[in-house]
Structures are given as C-alpha cells and as structure tokens.
Amino acid sequence: MINPYQYVQAEPYKLYIDGEFVPSATGETTQTLNPANNEPFATMYKGGKEDVERAIAAARDAFDNGPWGKMSNLRRSKLLLRARDLLLERQTEFACLEALDCGKMYPSTLYYEIPQALDAFQYYAGKARAGLEGKVVPVDGGGQYLNYVTWEPCGVVGEILPWNGPLMMGCQKVAAILAAGNTVVVKPSSWASLSLLKLAEVFHEAGFPPGVFNVVTGSGRLVGDMLVRSKDVDMVSLTGGTETGKSIIESSADTVKPLALELGGKSPNIIFEDVDIKNAAKWALWGFTLNSGQVCVAGSRIIVQESIYEEFLAEMASLCKNFKLGDGFEFENGVNFGPLISASHYDFVLSTIQKGKEEGARLFVDGTKVDDTLAKGNFIAPTIFANVTEDMTIFREEIFGPVACVSKFKTEEEAVALANAVDFGLAGAVFSNNIKRALRVAEQIKGGQIYVNTYFSKGMVESPGTGWKQSGLGIAGIHKYMRSKTTFVELGENVEPPM
C-alpha cells in the first residue's frame, strides 16, 4: 500500500502571489481533514482581504505592464508544455495529495484525473498557437469595406474552483485562461486547496512570469466576493453550486463583468425497454456513483420504461453489492468506493435521504448503514429510491451524493416531460437500441451535454458542454476567457460619408 503522507509537507502550505510563496498577511492557518477519517493531516494559510488585493494587483500589473501581454503565442505554448512535463514528473505526488484531500480513490486520481490534467496543458498549448484565429466577414457598405473579427484576452480572470475535482478542473481552466493570454487569480475550495497550492510550484519552476498565476485560499464570502466585485478583475469563472452562482450574478452588477458559471445539475438518464438491461444498469450505476456521486453531471434521475422497471431496479441493486467502502488508498484490499468530502456534506446527504423517505419514495437500496470501522469517515454507500415522482424534493433538488431517484414512464413523450421537469439543464442520457428514437429524445432533452448509450465522456476538453436553465451561464471552451472585437476598414479612395 502506498504511503500518501510522505508527500505532505510539515510546514503550512503557502499562498502564491506575484511569483512568491507567502504566508497570509494575518498569519491565520486552517487544517485540512482526510474525509476517510476526518483527521487533520496538513495545514495551510488562509487568505484574507490584503492577500486578495495583492494578488489582483499582481495579476493586473502582469497583464498590463509585464512580459506576459507582449509574449508571443509560441512562447506561451512552450511554457504550458513545460508545466505539463513538470506535472508528469510529479504525478504520483499530486495524485496522493488529491486523493487525501478529496477522499478520492487513488487509482482514479492517478490513472484518470492526472492524465486529464496533463492532456489539458497539451491541448491548450496547441490552442495558444493554432486555435485563436479570427475571421474576415463579407459586409455590404457604401465603399470597399474590409471587416475582420479577432479574439482578445479578457485580462485578469478570477477562477473559483470546486472541491470535487480541483486538480483536474483547475488544470483545465487555468491552461485555457493562460493560453488565451490572460492572467489569473485562483480561489480553490476551502475543502480542497492543497493540489492548487502545490501546483503553483509547477508554474513557478516552469518559468511563468510573476503575477501571471496566483493562488489565494479563503472563504467564498470574502475571497470569491472580492474577485467578483473588483474593478481590476475583468471576468470571473465559477464551477460550483447554483445558489453560489446566483450570488455572483448579483455581486457582479456594479462592474457588469463577463461571467462563466458552471453550476449544479439534476440530470436525467432515460432507459427504454429495448435495451440490454444488464449493460444499461451498469452504465446507470456508474452515472450516479462516480466519485461517490459528487459529480455535477451525475445521472441521478433514472427514468425507466414501465415494462422493465422492476427488473432494472433489481439489477442495479445486485450491482450495488460489488462496492466495498473504505480509504481510497486501500484499493489493493478491494476498496472501490470512497467517502464524501466533509462531515457537513455527509449530514446534508443523510438529511435528503431522510426527506425522500418522509415524502413517500420507496427506499430500494439503503446505503446509510455502513461498517462500524468506517464510522469516523463520511461514508454513504450507493442508495436507490424507487417510485420517485416529480413533486418530491429528491427528484427536483441536487443531492451531490451516491443517491439515485428512479422514476417510471410509459410513453416517449412522458419520458421527455419527466426529463425536463426540473430547473436544471446540465446533462442527460438516453439508452435505446432504436438509434432514431435515441437521437430524437436526446434532441428534446433541455441540457447542454447529452450522452447516448453511455454515460460520461473523456472528450470534455475538445467538446465542452454548457449549462442550460439554472445549470450555467456563458459560452464553452477557451473563448469564454476571451472577448471578440470587430474592425471595419474603408479601402475605397476618397470615400465620403453618406448624407
């Protein structure tokens, strides 16, 4: 068994501001807990008002006056590739820190999330050189006009990261931000900051100029709100909960800055009667249990055709027996299911399970009763509710845990209506051997990322999704960190304005 604690530093993890590793201005620290046992294993400095102000000023100066704004796309690309190589050299260390901090399965961080992070650097290094082209637009005017559209960086970006995949998503966001020519102030989640604080060492060693990449920990109410309200921050990007997103929209009113909000979900997974039930049940289980259900695009509403409903439930229940809960580093002992991120989130998921029972849903698989040896951790096994109707809280609200709400339908029209009967529109899936029907239904689901006969995808960098309804705001990909500019040039001789 690998010892992850060998990679944990004894001294507090420092903030990274203007090319320097620094303690917080107040000297305040906070402990980081292992979700598998809720015991502290590391200490980090907690950022405050002065730290945020300094980081914003550094990012502003680096963009306006430093070498970054004048740097060629080729040079930026090479720096991103250098960062990728340095992360690759330290992948075991980063996988251990991420698994410890977030309660993840170690093989998942090492063999899936680290490769995805590495790929983001490589992909956006290519984008920096070849993916930012503008276009020439034919226009009708009084003379001979040339019109061209270019994409330019926003400037200083405030990036607010989630706790469920901070390293992978952090690398994806930051690589895009920097490839576009911006500078950035990153605010990692208070529940999972270590990998981003450590990632600063990669950017530092790679040779990024001071102020280009900054990391400040702290609460969203302080650090996040300051990024949103600051006139020196040109745009803010958040991956997080819908209520947080609404608060950011309100706080950004004074500066009217661009926002990119990737918010919550309550995604449907429609299962038609013509499927291979065993295969579809495996995908459905994967769709709501990956990372212990702490995935924004999780298929937590499973909508099954009436004729196969009970058989499908029984198959999923049988598959649930294959999970073994425990510390993510005990994978060699058969552990394949980790804890929730924190004790408070554990309590929230338990409360929603209780609410489901009170509102009349049938608790088909109860994951709340776990081995006493796991009592110190935040463990809930896969939980399945049957006979869930659209008026129930568990049908309508995001749980962000390993809880599936299974509903039944008779007709295709009823399935689509159930799929769209919530305020979210992040993702969705359709399983059917009738490909015409599958694509027809996929087209009708109100969501930005749809899977057909599968769940989840590795192509998120190449083809990112956007949130519909209360699941998000803004465009996808690298251009969300850029602004378009259209330029008109009069090419005619001695052209006078029309009178």
Image (spheres, rainbow, N blue to C red):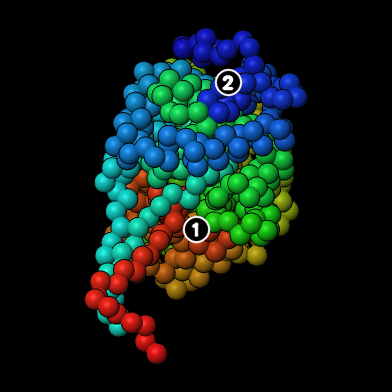
Distance from label 2 to label 1 (Cα)? 33 Å
| Closest to the observer, 73 or 495 | 495
The residue indicated by pointer 2 is 21
Question: Residue 34, position in %: x, y?
Answer: 62, 22
Label 1: element kind? loop
- Image height check: is 190 above or below 287? above
| Closest to the observer, 489 or 334 | 489
| Tag 2: amino acid | Phe
Mark closer to the observer (2, 1): 2
Q: Residue at x 37, y 37 (%)?
A: 71
Q: How many marks?
A: 2
| Closest to the observer, 9 or 450 | 9
**Which quadrant would the C terminus be assigned to in this image?**
bottom left
Are the residues flagged by discs 2 and 1 in contact, CB closer than 8 Å? Answer: no
| Tag 1: amino acid | Gly
Picture disc at residue 373: none
Label 2: element kind? strand
Q: Residue at x 40, y 29 (%)?
A: 114
Picture disc at residue 474: 1
Work out whether residue 105 can be spotted: no
Residue 255's image quarter?
bottom right
Q: Earlier in the sequence, mark 2 or mark 1?
A: 2
Left or right, residue 253 beside residue 468: right
- Image height check: is 125 above or below 313? above
Work out whether residue 226 can be spotted: yes
| Closest to the observer, 354 or 195 | 195
Question: Residue 224, position in %: x, y?
Answer: 65, 43
